[in-house]
Image: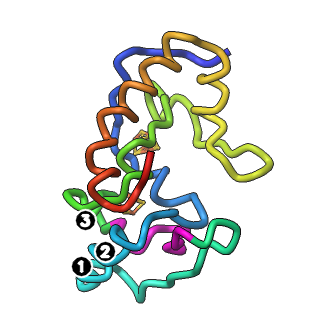
């Protein structure tokens, strides 16, 4: 059973920017990041998301926009999937970053299945990010 604190406060360790193999986003979001490529630590590696045909993937591990201080260099234009993500860890030092076998964040996946209150909290945070999503190519 994982510790749950609501509201969740991100301690900005950057693990969710360092570990995932890619960030999935719309073309609109990709255009914004491409225009900010001078803030990246390396060439941007874009790949099509073949199953959907609607999204593109910015390849990560780490994300090229994770800066030397472990912060997002494009925070004000970060994609919806970054805006809505929470790991749920009360502290990154007390709980390591963990992945499920299929590469999802185990820290949040287990909390979502463990606590209705946490699920609702995560849903509220995602809802708060949706105006950005709808303005940048995501559809309901
Ligand atoms: S959401 Fe979690 S993994 Fe991502 S920066 Fe915040 S504390 Fe770290
Ligand atoms: S765009 Fe920013 S928030 Fe999103 S994965 Fe990259 S560094 Fe992290």
User: Which comes before the other along the chain, label 3 or label 1?
Assistant: 1
Contact between marks 3 and 2 (CB within 8 A): the answer is yes
**Horizontal arrangement in the rendering, residue 70 relative to residue 23 (left or right):** left
Residue beneath label 2, please?
A: 33
At horizontal 43% and vertical 66% (from top left) the residue drawn is: 26
Q: Position of residue 83 (x, y in %)?
A: 35, 47
Residue beneath label 3, please?
A: 74
Q: Which mark is residue 36?
A: 1
Whole-number angstrom distance, CA of label 3 to CA of label 2: 8 Å
Contact between marks 3 and 1 (CB within 8 A): the answer is yes
Q: Is residue 60 magenta?
A: yes
Secondary structure beneath disc 3? loop
Secondary structure beneath disc 2? helix
Whole-number angstrom distance, CA of label 1 to CA of label 2: 5 Å
Name of the residue lying farthest toward the right: 101
Quadrant where the image shows the C terminus: top left
Foreground disc of the pair 3, 2: 2
Q: Is mark 2 within 8 Å of ligand 2?
A: yes
Q: Which residues are magenta?
A: 54-66
Local crowd at mark 2 within 10 Å, few (<14), some, or many (≥20)? many
Local crowd at mark 3 within 10 Å, few (<14), some, or many (≥20)? some
Name of the residue lying farthest toward the bottom: 43
At horizontal 34% and vertical 18% (from top left) the residue drawn is: 7
Q: Position of residue 21 (x, y in %)?
A: 60, 65
Quadrant where the image shows the N terminus: top right
Task: In the rendered view, tell whether residue 119 sits above or below residue 63.
Answer: above
């Amino acid at each position: 059973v994982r510790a749950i604190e609501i509201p969740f406060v991100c301690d900005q360790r950057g693990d969710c920017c360092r570990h995932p193999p890619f960030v999935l986003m719309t073309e609109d979001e990709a255009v914004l990041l491409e225009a900010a490529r001078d803030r990246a630590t390396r060439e941007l590696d874009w790949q099509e998301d073949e199953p959907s045909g609607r999204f593109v993937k910015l390849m990560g591990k780490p994300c090229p926009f994770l800066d030397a201080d472990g912060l997002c260099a494009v925070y004000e234009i970060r994609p919806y999937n970054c805006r809505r993500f929470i790991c749920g860890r009360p502290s990154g030092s007390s709980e390591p970053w963990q992945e499920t076998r299929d590469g999802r964040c185990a820290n949040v996946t287990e909390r979502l299945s463990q606590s209705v209150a946490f699920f609702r909290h995560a849903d509220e945070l995602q809802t708060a990010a949706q105006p950005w999503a709808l303005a940048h190519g995501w559809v309901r």
